[in-house]
Amino acid sequence: MIRETVGAALLLATTGASAAADRRGDDWPRATEAAMTDAERVVLTSSMMPLPDGPLGDQIPEGAVKGAGYVAPIPRLGIPALTISDASLGVSWALGARGSQGATPLPSGTAMAATWNAVLVRKAGAMIGAEARAKGFNVLLAGGINLIRDPRGGRSFEYLSEDPLLSGVLGGEAIAGVQSNAIMSTVKHFAFNNQETGRHFANVRISEAAARESELLAFQIAIERGKPGAVMCAYNRVNGPYACGSDWLLNTVLKQDWKYPGFVMSDWNAVHSVEYAMHGLDQQSAGELDAQRYFQTPLQQAAARDAAYRARLADMNRRVLYAIDANGLRSRPVRPGGSIDKAANAAIAEEVERQAIVLLRNRGHVLPLASKVASIAVIGGYADVGVLSGGGSSQVHVDGGPAAALPGGGKGLFNGYEQYQRVTPPLAAIRSRAGEKVSVTFRTGAYVGQAVAAARKADVAIVFANQWQTEGFDQPDLSLPRGQDALIDAVAAANPNTIVVLQTGSAVAMPWLDRTAAVIEAWYPGARGGEAIAAVLFGDVNPSGRLPVTFPADTAQLARPLIDGSDTLEPLDAGKPQPGKSMTIDYSVDGADVGYRWFARMGHKPLFPFGFGLSYTGFSTSRPVVRNETAEVTVRNTGSRSGATVVQLYLIRRAGVPMRRLIGFQRVDLKPDEQRRVVVPLDRRVMADWRQGAWHLPAGRYEIAAGDNAEALGDRYTLDLPARSWSVGH
Ligand code: BGC
């Protein structure tokens, strides 16, 4: 361990004015609001859901584009309609509401985070934003960045990671990419919608410090970087009030502390009273789903009799107008029917997947597959059909819709079917890459004996194993459903060269791990997932993904071994509104220590730590040197193939107290023997505590290390810092 003492200047420079600085002095929003009639003042304050199978039925207005939402235009004032679509992984399928017209599906959010590549994630955001624009949407409900506090959460696949810095940075870049098309993105779901069980009524209990040091910090960073036009508040309650009616979340944290200039839209069916307007909500989404369209007549009446409501209503309008103007929705209006280069867009999705696949195990370098492999038995996972995708409002399909849809249970607008995307199936991609000289057989895996017989005859067995996640309900545990764990066990017993390819939304258990030769995590792999998987198996791509979420050895290691509410609610209804029901989700156990921070605090040994990922080459990383809010490290490719690694910097001890916090990261591509000095920006908020309305760094010794992952840490850099506090914005 090397020690250095540094002056107060280090890590203490002010970051200057917040990126979310108040730019609301603009004339157009103010002048336009002033020119509105009373009736016009309640146009922008609510949307409707223009879906043929939705509650509006055939009352869908003329100019609406079928999707998640629509706000009528006010042509007299030059205000465009808001045409709103889901979501973070591409323009959603919306139950096929737009005929057979699909879109380019990105890999899952967890896959995007596994790239740790801010530039690529921005490009992916720009791609889906361009498709939204071409289809006539000017608002994309992207930016799902709730922390994966529990890997069993049904929407983990849609979110990014368990870490506030990684989720904040990548989420912000994705949003900036979407908005580079002169359309607007959201960031969502503000805040603490980390599980689906009880999402419509659960009350999340969390201290202010823990909230600010974990998920709120992810939102703060994402908003600074991405400048989303809108923030979507969550369904659940937070310390009492519903998130969409939380004065603390919306008025104090978001608008006052962070000086957020845009508007807050509710989640769909999340508004319970007109008073939410006074608590900071600016737009009621799909008002027909709530008990009343509170933000139409009731809001107009409240404004007529109460000056506080009147002032608020003006502010609500100005905020929506600001977001319209600042994002170019007026100056560059959208028109449906734009052209889309599907091949180019699929190539972007493929690049994400190539960088997202995580090599978890590679005994005896069985991968990449050697040229002497003459026969391959591919087994299971519907690898002959397509690739798995996550369910719910974010579901994306290519033209023509799903290749297969298996009933997953549950009813409702979006939920119910485990869907495989109609893209090159992994089996076809493997066949094409293997060439004619290699025999490639396929067994569905439905019958274990048949799969084992095929595996026995082949040089290599590749088992595809899947775990479907969807909005609407959570996984009860970390197992692979439908007997897949037993299938892998049996195949691995029959063939020592068994390779498992996982398509999962987040972490799963691997009771069979020691008996396999290799394991790759492919996530939900998107538009050209089959090709990307084959490219990794055959070595055309050197895997470089790193886990954005801890893979626990057992659910007993989690802060909540049982998902709150899962023992009392019917699993398939757990994500639905249930009037009169209440429950508490208690985050006082783990507090700000989400994921690997919790594992470090408890001394738990995970199956695979956060940040973990193998490569076909090797890397060495030097001890970091910390200077002026940056850390410098030298990285070297010590192997014989080109590849990429991710420099991960962790704070591991602060003022005598052990801790584990990711404080900076940078992906680096290196040729064999190439060495590079990398300067990684650090975010001092991640190192700090939240205390009495400000960030606070205690005086004392700080120990920082570069790690291959959250557990494999290199030599420490030590610095002594005086105590320091600074205000919320920075
Ligand atoms: C989801 C949101 C989504 C909205 C509109 C809700 O069920 O929670 O993420 O944007 O529906 O489809």
Image: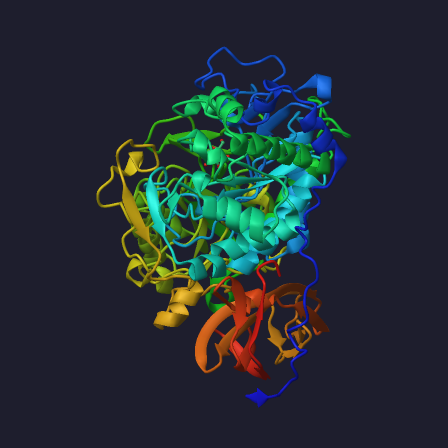
Quadrant of res 319: top right
Residue farthest to the right? Answer: 331
Give the side of residue 100 with respect to residue 599, left or right.
right
Looking at the figure, which quarter contains the N terminus?
Answer: bottom right
**Viewer-closest of 25 and 387:** 25
Vertical order, 186 against 374 (above or below) = above
**Viewer-closest of 661 and 712:** 661
Vertical order, 499 against 57 (above or below) = below
Image coordinates of residue 54 in percent, x first then y, are: 45, 19
Image coordinates of residue 617 in percent, x first then y, are: 60, 68
Looking at the figure, which quarter contains the C terminus?
Answer: bottom right
Give the side of residue 267 with respect to residue 327, left or right.
left
Q: Which residue is located at x 43 percent, y 42 percent?
A: 243
Q: How is the image coloured?
A: rainbow
Q: Which residue is located at x 41 percent, y 71 percent?
A: 600
Q: Which residue is located at x 66 percent, y 50 percent?
A: 20
Image coordinates of residue 305 in percent, x first then y, are: 50, 24
**Viewer-closest of 71 and 473:** 71
Residue 332 is at least partly visible in this image? yes
Q: Which residue is located at x 65 percent, y 48 percent?
A: 226
Give the side of residue 142 with respect to residue 564, left or right.
right
Vertical order, 568 against 684 (above or below) = above
Image coordinates of residue 34 in percent, x first then y, are: 69, 27
Quadrant of res 443: top left
How many badges with numbers are in the image?
A: 0
Residue farthest to the top? Answer: 58
Residue 534 is at least partly visible in this image? no
